[in-house]
Image (cartoon, helix red, strand yellow):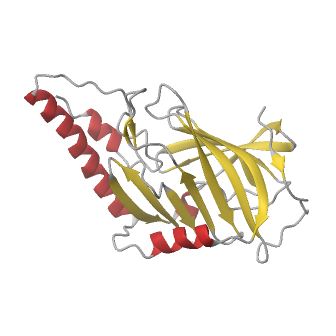
Amino acid sequence: MRKIILLFVLFTNFCFSQNWIKAEYSYLALANSSTNDTIKTTFLTNGNESVFRLNDKRKKGLDDKTGRLVHTDSLSNFNYTNLEKTYSRIILYNQEFVYSDSIWAKTNWNITKNKKKIGNYDCQEAKTTINGRSYTVWYTTKIPMSMGPLKLHGLPGLIIEVSEDSGQVFKLFLNNITFTEEKEEFEFCKNYVTNHKKLMDYKKYCSVMTDAMIYRKTRFYAVGAENNVTFTFGKGAFIKEMIDVPENLEKKLEELHQ
């Protein structure tokens, strides 16, 4: 069982207007991987706003050991959330996507009767589906906060573990949590996405991402035909790196054949 390190005294009620919380999670990347890559992440919140960022130090491009593509850059992927929207910045096939999403209106949690202890925390299970991905999370009400990592907001307590239900994308585990006064990373991420010149709404993101992935798969087939090579792709191969999957994208990709 993963040990949770508690570095400060927890009070029954947090005053988020005065305190910033910093939680560090391990992000276990499962997509297209024969070996699991663990990425350190940072989650910063004051209860009204939050930033979740992957600190992805992997070398981008084709991994010589696994033969898979690593999608990252010097900034990595991150989200900024306020009480109205989530703003996301992702890198996929060397292309940057920055977009907003009215995530609060989409999130409906099913809190189950399942409970378990993780480290020092008594946790409750909850499930939800957001933008084509289904999640199972474990949270604790011992640390009350409604903001969570990624786009997993609206629960009555801190999220301790997350699993994406297909088992092919990622898992997330809490390592430690502290109070902090350092907000430089938060301000950078917030300003980057909210002021980005190519910021899209979610509908536009879905259109652009769909076109990009159809083009990507079509190009693979074209290169294969030119070189008398046949490419085969597993189910969901082009969407495994996505947290937000455009509706019908997987179906459209499956309809493309060499």
Compared with 111, 15 (above or below) is: below
Furthest-left residue in this view: 226
Left or right: residue 103 compared with residue 144: left
Image spot of residue 205 (x, y percent): 35, 59
In this rendered view, identify the residue nearer to me: 51 or 239.
51
Dividing the picture into quadrants, the one containing residue 99 is bottom left
The answer to whether residue 85 shows anywhere in this view is no
Total marks placed: 0
Q: Residue visible at 48% across and 48% down?
A: 243
Q: Residue visible at 45% across and 56% down?
A: 74
Question: Which quadrant, please, contains the N terminus?
Answer: top right
Image spot of residue 97 (x, y percent): 37, 59
Left or right: residue 184 compared with residue 12: left
Q: Residue visible at 58% across and 63% down?
A: 104
Image spot of residue 11 (x, y percent): 91, 63
Left or right: residue 162 compared with residue 140: left
Image spot of residue 193 (x, y percent): 46, 69
Q: Residue visible at 69% across and 52% down?
A: 24
Dividing the picture into quadrants, the one containing residue 256 is top left
The answer to whether residue 56 shows anywhere in this view is yes
Compared with 4, 74 (above or below) is: below
Left or right: residue 200 compared with residue 43: left
Question: Which quadrant, please, contains the C terminus?
Answer: top left
